[in-house]
């Protein structure tokens, strides 16, 4: 236990920490020191039962509160989260390896934004009135019931809060399973929600691997499943949810394009490509890892990118001047190294990075390949590490076809000073989240999510309300009922 803020047990159920050391031990390894900083235990069937029973028991009374009352709890939780941002960020940095300069602004703060936004929205959730002559219909916007959230390891606090906030605002309860690689911060989200006044059982966290996720999804008490993870996992989770006709939100992987035209602002385009490839050491789902650069700006782009890469500062991510951290695990580092080797073997030109940095910690240099072609593995597969592929193009129509020639559809961006072209390009992109002259910004007010294999449903914004509530129609007859006999 390195920090006081460390959670005190593996699970948070029915308003308090719960331990059961008979579950499979899950060591938490710091990606910088490679040392074990904590241990949690996977949920046993008894723990899973406790969590689902608590969530089921608590949900009805929570849904019966007014939206304003529920919203007040969420907004209080947002305030607590902001007050503790520094400590939460340190915990997140230790768990994920992401630099503190990132976690201070993008994790608990983003989670707090979601709690505040959906807290504000909760009181205004309504149905509608439809007049039909003398008769009328009104709709009731009702909670779905018990929701299961399953998280990936790259944004543990953000993912936990992005799922909790709309779910709870709509009157649902939740059992959340964080990634086994980064299990700590979701426990703090649960602790804070309960400190803010969420009734016991409304938001529970249980640890474990895929089996625990499956046990949760397939339980008949569960009404909705929201996953953030890879496409292969998405297929399994969606299939399991389908057996029970459960609602789903799927936030899955991507291989997104960034298209840079000759007339783009060079500095902005380079910044966008850096944000879209190297933030969080490249472990961001919406990363624009296929960077299509028009021939007239290509050399200038690569030169300026190389210069900017000199400002990369790797090192202890708790040092606030460090801007590039390690990958989350040795396994992930190995996967990314495998892709880099493939890029070289398939003939891409390595123009920066490509190597491990030092031999302690899972640090990989930010890596840039040029002369990448559409069929190379580094241009087709999600790498989830700091590897940018630069591809050449000449023509707008052609680059749009190539940008869309992927089964993924999470994000896409365009850099150009031609407004007409910018809007034509985003209209043509087959992606859920698109950008003009910027990249990888995800404010809570805007819908976030993917099309094609990258997902189903949207997180954030008012759109998320539709994914955590359902409408009941109430037909009110005002005249005598006419029947044929
Ligand atoms: N679209 C988004 O918003 C978004 C955000 C972050 C990450 N991601 C994606 O997540 C992936 C990286 O994260 P990861 O490696 O943790 O993903 P992953 O798919 O390996 O695991 C995600 C979660 O699913 C659980 N899981 C695994 N198998 C399961 C099963 N059979 N049933 C139920 N749960 C199961 C894991 O334990 C983990 O909690 C990348 O593909 C990335 O693009 C997407």
Image (tube, grey):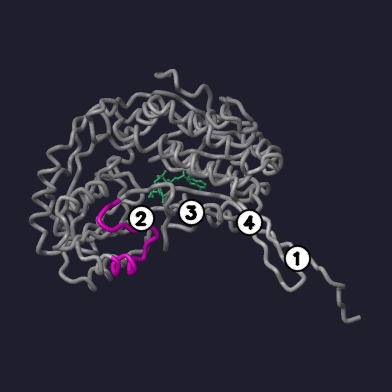
Residue labelled with disc 3:
250
Q: Can you tell which of label 4 and label 1 is closer to the viewer?
A: 1
Q: Alpha carbon of mark 4 to alpha carbon of mark 2: how far?
A: 29 Å
Q: Can you tell which of label 1 and label 2 is closer to the viewer?
A: 1
Residue at the spot 31% in from the left edge and 30% down from the top edge: 100
Q: Alpha carbon of mark 4 to alpha carbon of mark 3: how far?
A: 18 Å
Q: Alpha carbon of mark 1 to alpha carbon of mark 3: how far?
A: 33 Å
Residue labelled with disc 2:
254
The reply to whether discs 3 and 2 touch (Cβ–Cβ < 8 Å) is no
The reply to whether discs 4 and 3 touch (Cβ–Cβ < 8 Å) is no
Identify the element where label 3 is drawn. Answer: strand
Q: Alpha carbon of mark 4 to alpha carbon of mark 1: how far?
A: 16 Å
- Which of the marked residues, 4 or 2, is nearer the chain's N terminus? 2
Left or right: residue 253 compared with residue 116 = left
Q: Can you tell which of label 1 and label 3 is closer to the viewer?
A: 1
Residue at the spot 26% in from the left edge and 27% down from the top edge: 320
The verdict on label 2 being within 8 Å of ligand 1 is yes
Q: Can you tell which of label 4 and label 3 is closer to the viewer?
A: 4
Q: Quadrant of residue 213?
A: top right
Q: Which residues are magenta?
A: 423-439
Label at residue 322: none
Q: Position of residue 228 (x, y in %)?
A: 46, 48
Residue labelled with disc 4:
470
- Which of the marked residues, 1 or 2, is nearer the chain's N terminus? 2
Q: Residue pushed farthest front?
A: 134
Residue 426 on the magenta span: yes
Identify the element where label 2 is drawn. Answer: loop
User: Which class describes the residues within 10 Å of circle 3: few (<14), some (14-19), or many (20+)?
Assistant: many
Residue labelled with disc 1:
475
């Amino acid at each position: 236990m390195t920090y006081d803020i460390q959670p005190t047990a593996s699970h948070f159920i029915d308003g308090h920490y719960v331990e059961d050391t008979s579950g499979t031990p899950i060591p938490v390894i710091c990606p910088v020191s490679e040392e074990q900083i904590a241990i949690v235990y996977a949920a046993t069937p008894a723990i899973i039962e406790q969590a689902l029973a608590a969530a089921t028991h608590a949900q009805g009374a929570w849904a019966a509160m007014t939206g304003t009352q529920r919203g007040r709890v969420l907004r209080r939780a947002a305030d607590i989260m902001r007050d503790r941002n520094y400590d939460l960020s340190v915990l997140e940095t230790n768990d994920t390896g992401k630099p503190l300069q990132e976690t201070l602004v993008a994790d608990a703060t983003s989670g707090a934004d979601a709690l505040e936004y959906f807290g504000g929205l909760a009181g205004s959730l309504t149905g509608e009135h439809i007049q039909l002559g003398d008769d009328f219909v009104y709709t009731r916007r009702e909670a779905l019931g018990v929701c299961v959230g399953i998280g990936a390891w790259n944004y543990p606090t953000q993912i936990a809060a992005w799922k909790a906030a709309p779910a709870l605002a709509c009157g649902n309860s939740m059992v959340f399973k964080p990634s086994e690689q980064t299990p700590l911060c979701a426990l703090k989200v649960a602790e804070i929600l309960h400190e803010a006044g969420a009734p016991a059982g409304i938001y529970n966290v249980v640890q474990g691997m895929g089996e625990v996720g499956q046990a949760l999804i397939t339980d008949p008490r569960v009404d909705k499943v929201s996953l953030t993870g890879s496409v292969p996992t998405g297929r399994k989770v969606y299939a399991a949810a389908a057996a029970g006709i459960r609602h789903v939100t799927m936030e899955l992987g991507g291989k997104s394009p960034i298209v840079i035209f000759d007339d783009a602002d060079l500095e902005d385009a380079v910044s966008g490509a850096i944000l879209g490839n190297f933030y969080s050491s490249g472990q961001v789902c919406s990363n624009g890892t296929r960077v299509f650069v028009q021939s007239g700006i290509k050399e200038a782009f690569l030169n300026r990118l190389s210069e900017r890469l000199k400002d990369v500062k790797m090192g202890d991510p708790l040092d606030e001047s460090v801007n590039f951290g390690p990958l989350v695990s040795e396994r992930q580092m190995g996967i990314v190294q495998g892709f880099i080797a493939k890029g070289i073997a398939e003939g891409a030109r390595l123009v920066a990075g490509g190597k491990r940095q030092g031999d302690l910690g899972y640090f990989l240099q930010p890596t840039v390949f040029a002369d990448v072609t559409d069929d190379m593995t580094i241009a087709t597969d999600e790498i989830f590490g700091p590897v940018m592929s630069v591809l050449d193009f000449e023509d707008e129509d052609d680059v749009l076809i190539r940008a869309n020639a992927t089964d993924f559809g999470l994000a896409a961006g365009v850099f150009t000073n031609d407004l007409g072209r910018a809007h034509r390009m985003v209209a043509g992109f087959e992606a859920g989240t698109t950008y003009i002259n910027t990249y990888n910004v995800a404010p809570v007010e805007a819908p976030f999510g993917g099309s094609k294999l990258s997902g189903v449903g949207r997180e954030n914004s008012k759109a998320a309300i539709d994914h955590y509530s359902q409408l009941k129609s109430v037909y009110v007859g005002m005249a005598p009922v006419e029947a044929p006999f």
